[in-house]
Image (tube, helix red, strand yellow):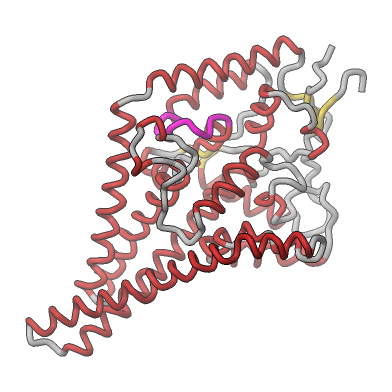
Amino acid sequence: MLHPYSLKTSQGKLIGPRTQADMLAFQAELDALRLRVFRDLGASDARYVITLLWLARGFEVAGRGLFVLGGLYWPLWCLGVLLLTIAHLIETMELGHNLMHGQFDWMNDPRFAGKQYNWNFACDPVDWREFHNHTHHHYSNVQGKDRDYDSLRLTGHRPWSRKYLLQPLISTIAALTFEWGVAMHNLQMEKRRTDPIGTQARMARIWPRMRARLLFTVRREYLWWPLAAMALAGAGAALLSQPLALTAVTCGMAMLLGNLAAGILRSIWAYFIIACGHFTDEAHTFAEADLVGETKAQWYLRQILSAANFRGNVVLDVLSGNASHQIEHHIYPDMPSIRLAQVAPEVEAICKRYNVPYNTASLPWQVWTVFWRILRHSFPGGWLNLTRVQLPGK
């Protein structure tokens, strides 16, 4: 007999463990794998995250320093943008995102404490932990619950309207302004018509903190750093008997434009990396009704089906915050990111044994499937990719 939580795709294909015994065995194998890794955590994992912190700081200093030293001399300015972008990606993707999951809380080092870490990003950590750690991770790809997934029409099960014709344009704008969109995500402004009272209450609770964070970020990146660059360049020009005003203004503009360019590049990269983790053509969609009575084994199964990996090297892993192993991250959100590549082959093998699809491909291919899925569902129809509970006898 089928287990009550056997899953069935819209195409009629049964996936996942078929019996109660198989479901429990599936959970037991994933639990045992997690336990084995956590028992092995130690000095090498600590060295990794400490090294990353120093790398991020070093790249940031080098990048901003090149804006001051090189001014608008474009080869040095471009190198500065590259270095600052790398610093931002390490800080946001591999440090901030993963630390706030509590992945290195076991170190008892306040620099890496998940509830205290304050990243170099416009989104307030309190808001991030609320809408990402709790809402997104618990309700991954669940229609009506996962707001990351509901921001676009990605399934034929969702009714179409003319506004979805703008999806490609909206996605482009979202990629370019991702940092600022994420910073304001927790306001849930899409509910202002359906729940005006709740929206007002949420605004009153969140907006003062969010506004302060946004203003601080804008001032830091586009006022304080450019002014600091102008002061340093002006002092250098005075010592070298160079035109003081011209040098100061040139270096100040180089800093401002460099910060802007690095911020946009981080936004574009982060948008597509995150999209490749959940918006690919093989990522499954779920109904809220099927969460009733969900067990840990069933949660594991849903998390695996809602996520997607992409293949790459160590550099790609770090710059993507190890979102290249999104499947493993979603079943083990508090596992140090450096360990995800280690457990990925074992997770894939477990999935194979229990008839669970394991979605992985190259990064270019996953980017293409995300692009095509967004474009296809901008028009009527689309893929019927809702995966539902299959009750015995039905």
Residue 172 is left or right of residue 233, and the answer is right
Q: Nearer the viewer, residue 259 or 367?
A: 259
* Residue 235 in which image quadrant: bottom left
Residue 321 is left or right of residue 178, and the answer is left
Q: Residue 251 at what x, y percent from top left?
A: 26, 78
Q: Residue at x 54, y 63 (%)?
A: 210
Q: Residue at x 46, y 44 (%)?
A: 115
Q: Residue 14 at what x, y percent from top left?
A: 78, 24
**The N terminus lies in quadrant:** top right
The residue positioned farthest toward the right in the image shown: 393
State how many labels appear.
Answer: 0
Asked whether 303 falls inside the magenta stretch, the response is: no
Asked whether 340 falls inside the magenta stretch, the response is: yes
Q: Residue 73 at what x, y percent from top left?
A: 24, 76
Q: Residue 154 at what x, y percent from top left?
A: 73, 50
Residue 58 is left or right of residue 341, and the answer is left
**The C terminus lies in quadrant:** top right
Q: Is residue 235 above or below residue 185?
A: below
Q: Which residues are magenta?
A: 331-341
Q: Is residue 258 above or below residue 275?
A: below
Q: Residue at x 82, y 28 (%)?
A: 389
Residue 211 is left or right of residue 55, and the answer is right
Q: Residue at x 45, y 58 (%)?
A: 121
Q: Nearer the viewer, residue 208 or 20?
A: 208
* Residue 360 in which image quadrant: top right
